[in-house]
Image: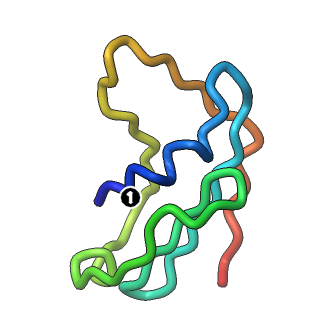
Amino acid sequence: MKPDPDKDKALKMGEWNTMKIRVDGDHLTSWLNGTEMVNFSDEKIGEGEGGIALQIHDGGGIKVKWRNIVIEEL
């Protein structure tokens, strides 16, 4: 699910950004630098089990690095 294009301004290009993702059952909410990006429910998310994968779609040569990953159980 893509966030509203108006929210693109939350991204700090060339800097570290903070992303928070909360999944509670079938409900997912994500924030980028404190701005809520998406908030929705999806049956398939609620059925998920197993590992966590970090993915970025090709955006014209964009480079992504991850750091300080924290996973908390609800």
Taking the view exactly as shown, the residue that stands out farthest to the right is 68
Q: Quadrant of the N terminus?
A: bottom left
**In the displayed structure, would residue 5 be above or below residue 65?**
below
Task: Classify residue 45 as left or right of residue 33.
Answer: left
Which residue lies under the disc numbered 1? 4
**Crowding near the residue tagged with mark 1, few <14, some 14–19, many ≥20 C-alpha atoms within 10 Å:** few
Q: Quadrant of the rendered structure where residue 16 is?
A: top right
Q: Looking at numbered disc 1 in the image, what kind of residue is underneath it?
A: Asp
Please give the name of the residue rendered at 77% of the width and 42% of the height, measured from the top-left corner: 68
Task: Classify residue 59 as left or right of residue 64.
Answer: left
Count how many numbered circles sit on residues in the image.
1
Please give the name of the residue rendered at 62% of the width and 25% of the height, measured from the top-left corner: 13
Q: Position of residue 55 (x, y in %)?
A: 40, 39
**In the displayed structure, would residue 35 be above or below residue 5?**
below
Taking the view exactly as shown, the residue that stands out farthest to the left is 44
Q: Position of residue 31 (x, y in %)?
A: 60, 61
Q: Quadrant of the rendered structure where residue 73 is?
A: bottom right
Between 56 and 6, the residue placed more toward the observer is 6
**In the displayed structure, would residue 59 be above or below residue 73?**
above
Task: Classify residue 14 as left or right of residue 42.
Answer: right
**In the displayed structure, would residue 30 be above or below residue 26?**
above
Please give the name of the residue rendered at 50% of the width and 62% of the height, measured from the top-left corner: 37
